[in-house]
Amino acid sequence: MTTAISLVRENAESMQPPRTLWVSFPLGRPLGKPDDAAFQHRVIDAALKLLSAPSGPVLADFPEDAPPAGLSDAPACPVSFSKPSKDTDSWKTKLLDELQTLVPWHDLGLRRRAGRSLVGVSGLSMTENIEKLGTLLDNETLPITELKWFKSAIEDTKVFYLEALTAQPGHYNQEQLEKLFWHETALGAAILKFNDMFAAHTTLSYMARIITPRRVLP
Amino acid sequence: MSKVQPPLGPKVWTHPNRETAELRIALITTAGLHFRDAPAFEFIDSTFRPISASEDANSLVMSHSSVNFDKAGFAEDVNLVFPIDRFRELEAAGKIGSLAEIHYSFMGAGLSPEAYETSASQVAGLLKQDKVDAVFLTPV
C-alpha cells in the first residue's frame, strides 16, 4: 500500500494515486515546518490515516498551513554585501573575496547544525569551485565539456551561501533570502551571467533553466 | 512538466487488512537524496538510491536538478523532506509496526512518470524482500 504527500494538487487530481494528502506548503517543504516535530507528526498522522480508507483513490487536504516566517522574524543578515568592489576586480577575485567573508559564518552554521551540511555534491572544495567558476566568467567561456561538474558546483556554492546566511538560529523568510542571494551577492550575479550565456547558446540553452529559477530573472 | 498527467494505468487498490500499528513502513522520496559517497543524480535520471536506516540521515545530501524550490528548510532539518526521525518516534511509540531496513530516493525532475517504471519495479521487489507493507511517499 502507499500513502503520499502532494505539493501540487493538480498532479494528484489527474494521476489519481491510491492515497494522497495534499498540503499547502511551499515546494521543498513537504512536511511543512523545519524543527517542528509536533507539526510534522500532524502531517504524517493525516497521511497515515488514509491507509485505513475502505476504498480509493483518496485525495484529502491537510487543514493547516505552515506558519509563514515574517520579514521581521529572522535574525539580521550576518554579512553585508554592499561593499563596492573595484571596477577592475575580476570575477574570480570578487567571488573569492565574497567567499572569505562567508566562511566564518558557514563554520558557525556547521557547529550549530552539529556538522550537518548539504555541501559536497561536486566533490571539489568551495575555493576550487569558486576559482573555476570565476575563471570561466573572466574568460567569458562556458564549461561545455564539464556540464555535470558545473551544475553540481553551482548547487554546492548556492547551498554554502544559504547555510552561511542562515548560520544563526531563527525562522527565515524564503523570499527575503532569495532576494538577498540573487540581487545582492556576487555569486548571484555570476550565476545570472552564466544564465544569460547559456540562454544565448544554440544547443545548451536548457542549462539556463537548471541553474536559475525563472522568478529571479529580470 | 505539466501539472496535469493522466493516471498511469487502471486504478489499483489494496484493501487494508491490518491496523497501521502492525505495518512495516518504508519511506520513499523524489527529492534526489543520497549519501555523499553515492553517485549524484544526473540532470535527468530515473535511477534510485538506497538509504540505509542504520546510517545517519543527517549525512544525506540532495542532487535534485530542479532550481524551483528552496533548500533552506532541508538544510535546517532533514525531516522536512525525509521524516526518518518522526517515523522512528512512531515506531518507538508503537504507532507503526516497524521501519524498513532500507528506504529509497528517486530524483523527480525532467521525466514523465512512465520513465520510472523499470526502477520503480526494482524498488517494489526490494520492498517485498524487506517485507514492507506500506510506503510513505514524499515529494520535494
Image (spheres, grey):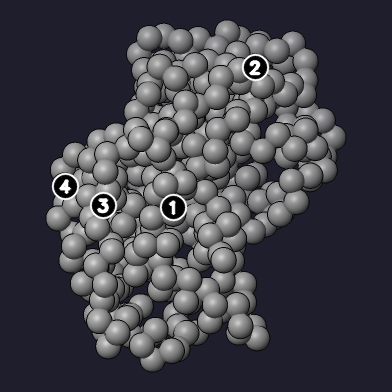
SS label for mark 1? helix
The residue positioned 74% from the left and 21% from the top of the image is A58
- Relative horizontal placement of residue A160, taking residue B47 as reference (left or right): left
- Relative horizontal placement of residue A209, taking residue B73 as reference (left or right): right
**Labelled pair 1, 2 in contact (Cβ < 8 Å):** no
The answer to whether residue A30 of the structure is visible from this angle is yes
**Mark 3 to mark 1 CA distance (whole Å):** 13 Å
User: In terms of sequence position, does the residue under pointer 4 or pointer 1 come before the other?
Assistant: 4
Q: Which residue type carries mark 2?
A: Leu
What is the quadrant of residue B75 in the picture?
Answer: top left
Q: Which residue type carries mark 1?
A: Glu
Residue assigned mark 1 = A178
Q: Which residue is outermost to the bottom?
A: A139
Q: Are marks 3 and 1 on the same chain?
A: yes
List x then y, in percent, for residue A49: 60, 13
**Mark 4 to mark 2 CA distance (whole Å):** 42 Å
- The residue mark sitting in front, 1 or 2, is 1
What is the quadrant of residue B92 in the picture?
Answer: top left
Q: Which residue type carries mark 3?
A: Ala
Residue A199 to residue A57: above or below: below
List x then y, in percent, for residue A110: 20, 46
Q: Nearer the viewer, residue B89 or A106?
A: A106
Q: Are marks 4 and 3 on the same chain?
A: yes
**Mark 4 to mark 3 CA distance (whole Å):** 8 Å
